[in-house]
Amino acid sequence: MISFTVNGALVECVDADRKLLRYLREDLRLTSVKSGCDEGVCGTCTVLVDGRAMRACVLTVEKASGKSIITVEGLSAREKEVYAHSFAAAGAVQCGFCIPGMVLSAKALLDKNPDPSREDVKKAIHGNICRCTGYVKIEDAILLSAKLFRENAPIPQAPSSGRIGSDFFRVDAAQKTLGEGMFADDMTLEGMVYAKALRSKYPRARVNAIDISSAIAHHDCIRIITAVDVPGDIKCGHLVRDWDALIAVGGITRYAGDAIAIAVTSSQDTLDEVLSLIRVDYEELPPLTSPAMSLSDDAPNIHENGNILSRQILKRGDAETAIAASKHVVTRHYSLPFIDHAFMEPECAIAAPNGIDGLTLYTGGQSVYDEQREVGELLGISADNVRVKSMLTGGGFGGKEDMIVQHHAALAAWLTKKPVKVSFSREESLLVHPKRHAMEIDFTTACDENGKITGVKARIISDTGAYASLGGPVLQRACTHAAGPYNFGDVDIEGIAVYTNNPPAGAFRGFGVTETGFAMESNLNLLAEMVGISPWEIRFRNAVRPGQALPNGQIADESTALEECLLAVKEIYERAPFAGIASGFKNSGRGVGVHDASRCILSVESGKIHVRSSAACIGQGIATVLAQMVCETLHIDPKLIIVEPPDTARTPDAGTTTASRQTVFSGEATVIAAKKLREALKESSLGELEGREFFGEYDPVTDPMGSDKPFPVSHVAYGYAAQVAELDEDGKILRITAAYDAGSVVNPKSAEGQIEGGIVMGIGYALTEDFPVEGGYPKSKYSKLGLIRAKDAPEITVTFVRRNERTEAAYGAKGIGELCMIPTAPAIQGAYYKLDGTFRCKLPMENTF
Ligand code: FES
Ligand code: FES
């Protein structure tokens, strides 16, 4: 019997080998201690052991013997209020999954050193990875906590205004800081059982037979599910239904993450044992591991319709002639890797029977309505019989759009009539979910003797892996934005997305624009050199201004402030000896003629205004944005507002959290509803409106790709940015200076935090992150993904610029969730080119620091 104290109480455990993390989470239900990797790498499981910050996932219960363990639940009341305030005030909380671990690392520091420097703080949180914030605001929060403790100061008042432009505290900051918010894996249901899929042994193999007899005989096994058990359509997919929920006998696997069978067991601990008893007879087939192999004449088809998922063409003017007649022409080939989202919370879903013909699904994805529809199709039941409730989402970045765990949990619950949890390990997460596309890009950019861009020609091949996911739209966005935020008209851009037996690739922050933006911006640096002007100057001369057409034909609106972004970073660029610069732009909304609506209900309940929207908060803070939209419209006390989490039974369809769209789309739907409530409030008090509902819908129209309009409206809004990356003489990044046209900034602190996080992600993309795949098998472990830690995150300065007031949707806000990282990698590329004269065309860049 091992005994020790947890949060001051004596506990005893007979299982000395049990992981401390499991004991704390599952036996003691201390769910502030998160499992982000189970490999001792991420720090989300940080606890204090006799005052030292340690990782509970690498400790056994035996190691805790006689020690004192503290989790966030065990902090004093004063500590809880200080950390909750400081993390909210600093804007340090996004998805929140890393935050309890950060708080404990902070406590370990501050208990010993009440007046730390920023360097001390960086050192203290070295073991804690945050994928959302870029660390700046977490460091600010810890320094603010130190000050409040040191001075024994009272907790300052939170901002009382929720109006647009105020640093209103995020509505979920305190619950996330204190580990009280519930992620799916934090939840247990009465009688809950567990499920896990057996993954294919080979990226490409025919499944000849599946023998489940030994597995089903295991004492913990409740059921083994194979493809024949699927009652509805076995094919999943948001846009293209090509992804088999399970590979049937006789079928051919398409990647190493394909599911062959699902084991349902009474204990989570025996899932692997039961899976190991399933015998699969495979006929191994040679995998197609590159687009070139898939496109060869003798390549077998990965899907019925062939190996090409999508071909996109954007031609305007006559680029061929324009380039041929140009004074300067640059052509380079760019190679960009697969990258994993590495959101801190691995995927988890719980499904439970709801009556005799219904099901409730609890998960943390990017759209409860996509999940509802796809689960309904898989089970062969009406979507109305599936209720999806969102728990907190521990980061997404595009990687939680597909059916990854939800469908398997739903299927298992449907067939066993029990609540079922499917909870991924980090290893499974890396294996199964879609990645950022690997792309090969041939890119030609031309200009005249004055540096005015005359034409762009690009050929893009994207490896979309085994399944479509969002590969078609990602390629399309790579094409629509390839020529950058510049004013010229001759473009010839073609892209092709190719199926392979590599992991699927799908949505990932930047959505193709990060990739082609790197090529275009890098080429511009060479053109500037040929013209004899600076990289800043060539961008300034070409920057699109209001009233001018972008290369895709859309007229830049009056708010367009790329010129101002460039001016804001000019001085710092010119002053720094080794600096690179890049511009970027990104759409808000899906655009290109795709139906894209958002809806919101405001209801008056118990004297409060409930904001009911299914817009998923994946860390970006949409709940807070919607609260601010209501405050701006009604000028009311934010304490009167309750923002409900997405729930198909309560919140109307707001569309997916994708394409930097929620601030604009759900923001405007909320404003429309709030204006109706405002009218009603002219006649009645809030009390008199009890029970009333006010509905808002925003459903703008855009023009499709290939529209014959001279100036099509491709997207409802574009945000613009410029970034400067500065290096020291040893090649270490000193500072990133960023200027953003985000329209009216709803919550500056929150927007800054998004941008800082995106920039740090962009630094990783430029220098350290990779997801190598060999022979169709991912070769990366979590510890090898190259995620940036606090000590490697440079100083970041963010400024917001405006030109004219944009008064359209959502009080003129524009999305920044993706734009934040688009200019970072090319700005760093330019800085290294300046430093050592090596022009790097491959990411991650080699021979840097
Ligand atoms: S370090 Fe323990 S869960 Fe990641
Ligand atoms: S807030 Fe740190 S991982 Fe999301």
Image (spheres, rainbow, N blue to C red):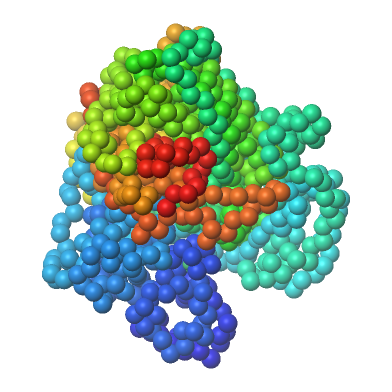
Give the vertical position of 810 relative to 578 (above or below). Answer: above
> Image quadrant of ligand 2?
bottom left
Quarter of the figure with residue 505? top right
Instruction: Name which residue lies at 32% across and 49% down.
Output: 728
Give the vertical position of 317 relative to 23 (above or below). Answer: above
Give the vertical position of 784 relative to 525 (above or below). Answer: below
Question: Residue 341 location in percent, x, y?
Answer: 50, 48
Q: Is 14 left or right of 620, judged from the image as shown?
A: right
Judge by depth and name the residue closer to the eye, 644 or 732: 732
Judge by depth and name the residue closer to the eye, 404 or 471: 471
Question: Residue 163 location in percent, x, y?
Answer: 21, 39
Number of numbered discs: 0
Q: Is 288 left or right of 153, judged from the image as shown?
A: right
Q: Is 180 left or right of 630, judged from the image as shown?
A: right
Q: Can residue 821 be seen in this view?
A: no
Judge by depth and name the residue closer to the eye, 292 or 649: 292
Judge by depth and name the residue closer to the eye, 377 or 577: 577
Instruction: Name which residue lies at 66% across and 30% down.
Output: 309
Question: Residue 642 location in percent, x, y?
Answer: 31, 48
Instruction: Name which residue lies at 25% across and 62% down.
Output: 118
Quarter of the figure with residue 271? bottom right
Q: Is 642 left or right of 231, judged from the image as shown?
A: left
Q: Is residue 482 visible?
A: yes
Instruction: Name which residue lies at 80% across and 45% down.
Output: 286
Question: Residue 480 location in percent, x, y?
Answer: 49, 24
